[in-house]
Amino acid sequence: MLYREAGDFKTTYRSDQQTFPIKSERFLFWAVIALVALAVPFFINDYLEKAVLIPFLVYAMAALGLNILIGYCGQVSLGTGGFMAVGAYATYKLMTGFEWMPMPVIIILAGFITASVGIVFGLPSLRIKGFYLAVATLASQFFLVWLFNKVPWFYNHSATGQITAPPREFLGFTLTGANAEPYATYLFCLGFVFVFAWVARNLTRGRIGRQWMAIRDMDIAAEIIGVNPLMSKLSAFAVSSFYIGIAGALYFSVWTGAAEVTEAFGIDKSFDVLFMIIIGGLGSILGSLIGAAFIVLLPVLMTNIFARWLGMSTEIAEHMQITIVGVLIIFFLIKEPHGIAALWRTIKEKLRLWPFPH
Amino acid sequence: MFLTDPFFWEVVISGLLAGVMYSLVALGFVLIFKASGIFNFAQGVLALFAALTLVGFMDGQVPFAHVINEALGTNYHHWYETPGGGDGAPIWFVALSIAATTAVMILLAWLVVKVVLKPLVNQEGIILFMATIGLAFVLEGVGDLMWGANIKVLDIGLPSGPSDWIIDQTGMFVNKLEISAAVVAVILVVSLTLFSQYTKMGRALRAVADDHQAALSVGISLETIWWIVWSVAGIVALVAGIMWGASSGVQFSLSLIALKALPVLMLGGFTSIPGAIIGGLIIGVGEKLFEFYIGPMIGGATENWFAYVLALGFLLFRPQGLFGERIIERI
């Protein structure tokens, strides 16, 4: 008897407006949270951590950020990789420059630094719209990657041009470096994603989120009814870059531990995150998470199927994988252009009425 | 002082010729965007796919050979040897291969319209854009599976190497291949313009570009028009693929030329064929001059981003690009 509203009475405005208005949905949500936060850390291993869970959490963070910009504010951006690089390099500079600083502070600060860069690159959005803007954001992608590659100060003049995360502890748990414990890094990333998914959910249904959506749906009309396009667009760029910066910071410090900018933050990152929010669902917090899970898990799954079970050579397996990802993207767009989140909504509607069709 | 510097002119000319190459790719974008409002990200991969197919026909490769061999343990590789032996294929064979590739591109256009675009009619621009990215993935994967991912040499007998005549006359170093690319681009643009201005089909194309619904109401089939447009874009991609493939080999990086064509589009406007050409020339000259004079001061390799920043600067003053249709917004 899932998703029954009968008997679930609301007596206050607050309880009527909560994120999960149905009791069983609330229960399901907290059960999932309890499972991922309390049970998973006990059986997590290195493979699960580095290949599945941390990538998922990092990309979920980036997808949340991009979804705020594209899904809620309607400003198409292809500069995600560049902004992730800003987050990563800010983390690196902070970690090596201020050794006493605790990790969460560093990561939040990296987010703020990325946000300020995002505002600068968001300025053209006031004048340029639609696909012109999408192409214009590629300028930030290419320029930022070039900058981090060419200015030695950003990578502390290291000979390889790489940045490497020094080992850091937080509350006695090693988070970065070779000795980091899988459960510690996992819980650290999970904490960030949980908190900021919650923040994003509440931002998007508040005043500022409604401004974003008004701009998305028709910016001139929004301007006429008194929404300030400057503030809304730039705040969307700032918040989105903040999230993406945190994703980049976690990507570098907790997940890979080392990064080379052209390789790690190339344009394919931007497209990956864009796929996530399109497949997951534009303008949906849940969609960002589902999309991230989908895009992260799919290659892992396919590598296992093609290379391990069917014994194909890696080259052919790789090409098969690209083809199948492409086919799936097209398939999803045709079947459900509003993403898996819309599918989930339909399922919920059906569940509420089950076993009756209408 | 600039104007008398032979280096300056050499840089300008190489920029112009590089710009022509960018324009070739940008043309394909413009054609599709005008006729269907689709921002076709797959244009670069289309060029790669066309070039791979052409090389496949020229070498007589068996498609999917390495997949079949691995699955069945056989050893297929070639249907036939390239006629003419080592010193270049005869012209009839090149023409035949190009014709066969054109047929493949037209078939591909039909498939794309039937399988991808038709179910997505009336979707938002971003959904269609994503679909073309999906298409780019599929084409890349299938192209590699069909013909193998190794770097291939494409030689259809175009002249190459530095032009002695220009060196004698002016002392400048200009590659013949780039000159032939410029000539081909001019021919292509002229024939496209003639096609769209003076043929019945071209009129139908312009009608669709102008207003989908009005075109439908006078009995123009959207599907057929899209098929034609994607075929033409496929052929333009083939030309671009031949030119780029002849100068730097056919390999995955060929598909990245799409990224070089995007600032050209921004600058010229998404809807203007002359814009694609002039935008390409401005971008080509601009990035070469910047790299030559300012690049060394700030570490070089500026070509990746300079085009975008230049285009961005232009857009701040003209949001629709140099030649794009004026954007009129109504509520």
Image (cartoon, rainbow, N blue to C red):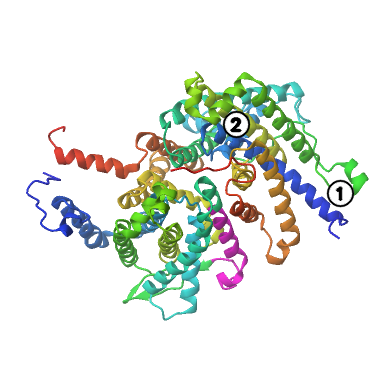
In this rendering, position of residue A221 left or right of residue B295 = left
Residue under label 2, please give it.
Answer: B233
Single out the residue that lies furthest toward the bottom: A100
Where's residue B95, x and y in %? 71, 23
Magenta span has A279? no
Residue under label 1, please give it.
Answer: B172
Q: Secondary structure at mark 1?
A: loop
Q: Secondary structure at mark 2?
A: helix
Which chain does tag 1 point to?
Answer: B
Report if residue A124 is visible in the image. yes
Magenta range: A137-162
In this rendering, position of residue B109 left or right of residue A213 = right
Magenta span has A142? yes
In this rendering, position of residue A200 left or right of residue B280 = left
Q: Which residue is at a point 15% across and 45% down the rendered structure image?
A: A3
What whole-number distance in Å separates the C-alpha atoms at marks 1 and 2?
Answer: 34 Å
In this rendering, position of residue A64 left or right of residue B303 = left
What is the quadrant of residue A47 in the picture? bottom left
**Chief SS of the magenta region:** helix
